[in-house]
Amino acid sequence: MAHFMYFAGYAYNIKVTSKSPIPFINETRAYIDANFAGLGVEIMQSVTANDSSFSSEDMSSNALGAYFGAYVFDSKSRLTLAEQVVKFLEQFGITDPEKADDWDQLPQNP
C-alpha cells in the first residue's frame, strides 16, 4: 500500500502543477511520469540489492497508485481520501490479503 499511496501523491502533484489547459494532457503526463519514476525506484532497489525490487506486487501497485492520483482522486470530493481509495480498489475485487494466491510467499513484516 505504501507504493500505491506514494505514486498516487506523486502523480497527483504533477497533475495539479502541470500547465496545459487540457486536463487530459495533465493527467496523462502525471500517469506516465509517475510510472517512469516507479520503474526508476525498482531499478535503484535492484542495484542496491534490495530484496523487494521488482517483487510481484511492486509494479502493479506503483501503476495503480499513479492511475489513482492522475485520474481518480478528487480533492473536492465529499469522500475522504480513504473512501476514494477503497471505492477505486473495489473495482478490482479487493479481498483480504490472506486470500491472495501468493500469500504464503510474501515476506513477513519484522
Image (spheres, grey):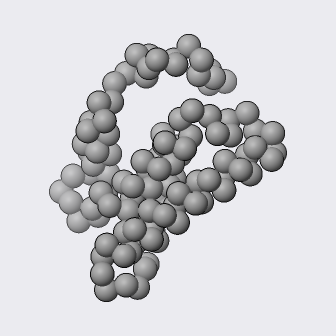
Screen quadrant of the C terminus: top right
- Residue 11: give x, y in percent of width and height: 45, 63
Name the residue at the right extreme: 48
Q: Is residue 43 left or right of residue 91?
A: right
Q: How many marks?
A: 0
**Can you see residue 92?**
yes
Return the residue nearer the eye: 59 or 75. 59
Q: Quadrant of residue 29?
A: bottom left
The correct choice, above or below, for 20 with respect to 107 in the image is below
- Residue 87: give x, y in percent of width and height: 25, 42
- Residue 58: give x, y in percent of width and height: 56, 40
- Residue 28: give x, y in percent of width and height: 40, 68
Q: Quadrant of residue 54?
A: top right
The correct choice, above or below, for 70 with respect to 61 in the image is below
- State the residue at coordinates (58%, 54%): 38
The correct choice, above or below, for 95 with respect to 54 in the image is above
- State the residue at coordinates (23%, 65%): 76
The correct choice, above or below, for 49 with respect to 100 in the image is below
- State the residue at coordinates (39%, 55%): 67
**Can you see residue 82?**
no
Name the residue at the left extreme: 78
Q: Is residue 87 left or right of residue 105?
A: left
